[in-house]
Amino acid sequence: MFKLRTAAALTAAALALAACGSNSTSSSSGSSSQPSAGPRTLTLWHYETADSAMGKAWTEAIKRFEASHPNVKVKFEEKSFDQIQKTASMVLNSDQAPDIMEYNKGNATAGLMAKQGLLTDLTAEATKRGWDKLLSASLQTTAKYDARGIMGADKWYGVPNYGEYVMVYYNKDLFDKYKVTVPTTFDEFVAALDTFKKAGVTPISNAAADYPAQQIFYLLALSKANRQWVNAFELYQGKVDFHGPELTYAADTLADWVKKGYISKDSAGIKSEDMGVAFMGGKFPIMVSGSWWYGRVQSTVKDFQWGSFLWPGNQMAPGSSGNIWVVPEKAKNKDLAYDFIDITMSKEIQNLLGNSGGVPVAADPTAITDEKSKELIDNFNKLNSQDGLAFYPDWPAPGYYDVLVSAVQNLINGETSAKVLDEMAQPYNDNLADIGN
């Protein structure tokens, strides 16, 4: 088991490393290790929306790839997060596997696929192409896995291209209308929620049919946690008491917020897409979600002023490197996949990512000129400076994402905290037994 590296310098290192990335495009200009005179196709899957920062960056990367590989056509297939989450094992173990795919990082996803032999070992390519120089040690944590599928080990099975974290998005116009100031403490945050509810406004746009609600649950647990608890929960570096103060507080508080109307009971059946659309439509003053929404909110919201802030009072929040490019073991054009990864790591694409509302890992800091993007990166820097990246609650065990979706839905629907925590504990402990911890 590895010792968690500090995340304090994550963004600073990521941006400062731009100088190291000056040659990151050198291998992307016709450098295929298996050249072919005939036409070829690179099949690419990802689940970023076209108006997100990553979607914009990867669209430009495709154009640059095709320009530098005139004999190659990129066949891009957009998949939803849920599609890839639910079908990855089956697809990767078939002849229908793409050449390159965006995939969620962590033990339960990329780690499990690596353990099953479904992902290509990228260690030699990472060294050859300089990806190991572009990415700081903290960012590399989610790229590397051991034989058990536990992250932070020695072999590369993916390449992250951006950073991410969970924050609070807020509608400045609604805050002004109801005379709510941006909270700096947790008590002030709860007071703000109460002010909105008393005015007849449900404060938080939420979705429990997929990931957002479990991230609010995790933020509440982190408000009572320290790094030792996170290491135990995420990395198996200690025993986790599911009825201890951290998770009990999270369950009790989330249930209380539903009873008080801070979160709608109807959100148990709402998906993240509908949550985001509702916030961007001005229907809610607050949305708690990740930086992956930032570029889309930035380009979509025209009718009100908005901003973001870190969850008040917490030293930690869900966050890590972004999702990773993986190359299926059964990919037919691995050399082209490596070339495409190179292009996404180039300064040009990383600068575009940063100015579109993303958190780049290899940009030129002086090229990030957009004020909203600077706000995003400044908050990320603040989180990193306090060793605040706590990964995500569904990472520890295969299938744990669905466990948490169901458990938090049950909590919102009125199930007792004790029973919900038991639902969370059993699969987690079963996985510990399976890997011999």
Image (spheres, rainbow, N blue to C red):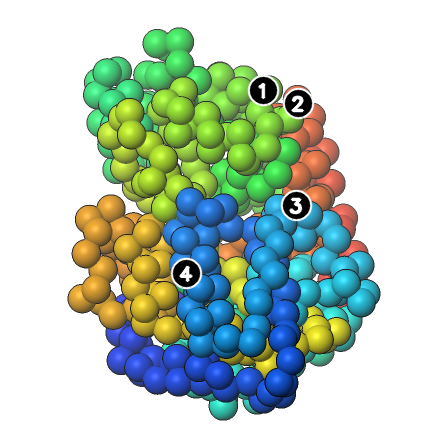
Residue at point 66% right, 45% down? 82
Q: CA distance from mark 4 to mark 3?
A: 25 Å
Q: Amino acid at mark 3?
A: Asp
Residue at point 32% right, 60% down? 352
Determine if residue 78 is in view: yes
Q: Position of residue 104 (x, y in %)?
A: 59, 58
Q: Which residue is mark 4?
A: 60
Say which element carries label 2.
loop
Q: CA distance from mark 4 to mark 2?
A: 43 Å
Q: Earlier in the sequence, mark 4 or mark 2?
A: 4
Horizontal side, residue 301 vs residue 69: left or right: left
Q: Amino acid at mark 1?
A: Lys
Q: Residue furthest front?
A: 38
CB under 8 Å between discs 1 and 2: yes
Q: Which residue is mark 1?
A: 265
Q: Position of residue 23 (x, y in %)?
A: 35, 84
Between circles 4 and 3, the one closer to the viewer is 4
Q: Position of residue 256 (x, y in %)?
A: 52, 23
In this rendering, is residue 404 above or below 9? above
Q: CA distance from mark 1 to mark 4?
A: 41 Å
Horizontal side, residue 84 vs residue 387: left or right: right
Q: Earlier in the sequence, mark 4 or mark 3?
A: 4
Horizontal side, residue 4 vs residue 16: left or right: right
Q: CA distance from mark 2 to mark 3?
A: 22 Å
In this rendering, is residue 58 above or below 405? below
Between circles 2 and 3, the one closer to the viewer is 3
Q: Which residue is mark 3?
A: 82
Say which element carries label 1.
helix
